Amino acid sequence: MSTPSRTSVASGTNPPSKSSAPGEPRRIAATAKPAVGRGYRLQWEQAQQAHVLLYPEGMVKLNDSAGAIMSRCDGERTIGQIVEDLEKTYDASGLTGEVTAFVEMAVAQKWLEVRE
Amino acid sequence: MSAVAAPRPGPPLWLLLELTYRCPLHCAFCYNPTNLAETGAELATEDWLRVLREARELGAVQLGLSGGEPLARDDLEEIVAEAHGLGYYINLITSGVGMTEQRIAALKQAGLDHIQLSFQDSTREVNDFLSSTRTFELKSRVAAMIKRHDYPMVLNVVLHRLNIDHVEQILDMADRLGAEYLELANTQYYGWAWKNRESLLPSREQVRRAEEATARFRERVGNRMQVYFVVPDYFETRPKPCMNGLGSVFLTVTPDGTALPCHAAKMLPGLDFPNVREASIGDIWYASPGFDRFRGDSWMKEPCRSCPEKTRDFGGCRCQAYLLTGDATNADPVCELSPHHHLITEAVERAEQAVAAGEARAPAVERPILFFRDHRSRDHRSRDRRNQR
């Protein structure tokens, strides 16, 4: 066996360096239905008090807003519905831009897949 | 600058279980200990299940099942099922030897998340030579199985002087096999690799060509495959932040139950590492001197202690410091600020000369390469020989 080498534990939602994920962000419609990407798993971790995204030999610890968005990406709800739910839950308005930008970044990272 | 006592560490997020040292391969670059005869009996199934439960309770979430060859354990499916029930993300790190349709289906059923398959090279000849077995075709079959059962596929190829010039073919092979990820991991020099370092260390030019080939490939395939090229640290001027600092994130349990803050740490002298047969994972992680020894920075010497980069690289790798300088509290000699950095540059210089001499002649191994054998491995070898006839 080789020494495990890619066992980094990333924090936050900053996209990893370009060399590991060459995807370009794409424009995504409000009717798109995002779901957690194939090969990734999203779960709540009690010990970290955070949602984490797990993938082969890696983990991304999501901040609160990224966790709130991703945990609603079930492949059933549209981005429009997710925004509506978030605005209601957090008593906020005008979240469309932030949510769309996050989903676009997450799709480029393959964290999310979009079903139109 | 004064030393700061280590704060209470976070949880051991990453758990690596080395289920067995048994392995049908005998790779010249293996990091496993070279004194296998001195290791104790393997843990029983119930012990592994208890380790999984205790570590998960502390917050462990990424699980590596490795070895040796983990498929040599016939309770692997049971261990995977328990880990899945507990909520781990489970990575199987395998040579593929011992994988069958039946087992891969049972592992899927049990909840295995991902399989990392190691290849030693893109060509049958080098693959089989480096692992001293005939396994290339078997590995190709296992790669197809991994695809059929819809696992994300990570291919891992350890690079060194004898195969680094094949990077282009290795990349094409990975693409043909449908890999989602390819790790081109340059050999790190511990265990067997350390003993074989003079034969395995590539030249600068070899590394540069391999990086260029990787960059061209990334350009060509785009998003289809993620390629990780792990630069050999001998060619760096700053050390790797090994294990994010010992005792901060990683916990390894060896086949006989010894708990280590890094899979190579057993070599460090004067440290007493606890055994999971005698202590809970909580006590091991939070209350054992072995895990605490290299936390914080009070153990550091100069130039690390007053270095502003110590919070980024933690002084590099303790095992490398020990192997090269004889003192695990020295700076990792990969760092150009280390007074021992010449030990690295001299090894690289010898590699340059050996490669230059080798390229003038036919490509050949200048020094005998050492392979490891134990009793069980020898059985596999003789079987392999029979199969060749």
Image: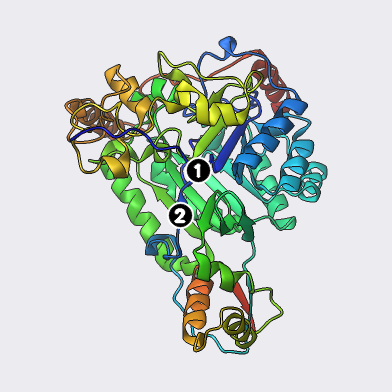
The answer to which image quadrant residue B294 occupies is top left
Farthest front residue? A91
For the N terminus of chain B, the image quarter is: top left
Name the chain under label 2.
A
Residue B18 visible in the shown view: yes
Residue toward you, A33 or B381: A33
Name the chain under label 1.
B
Residue receiving disc 2:
A10
Q: Secondary structure at mark 2?
A: strand
Q: Is residue B374 above or below residue B29?
A: above
Q: Secondary structure at mark 1?
A: strand
Residue B131 visible in the shown view: no
Label 1 neighbour load within 10 Å: few <14, some 14-19, many 20+: many
Write the residue at 55% across / 41% down: B14
Q: Is residue A13 above or below residue B247?
A: below
Total labels drawn: 2
Label 2 neighbour load within 10 Å: few <14, some 14-19, many 20+: some
> Could you tell me residue B298's position as x and y percent?
29, 28
Q: Amino acid at mark 2?
A: Ala
> Could you tell me residue A90's position as x and y percent?
56, 78
Distance of mark 1 from mark 2, alpha carbons? 24 Å
> Could you tell me residue A75's position as x and y percent?
69, 76
Q: Amino acid at mark 1?
A: Val
> Could you tell me residue B202's position as x and y percent?
33, 36
Residue toward you, B122 or A79: A79
Residues at marks 1 and 2 on the same chain: no
Q: Is residue B157 above or below residue A15?
A: above
For the C terminus of chain B, the image quarter is: top right
Give the number of the disc on residue B157: 1
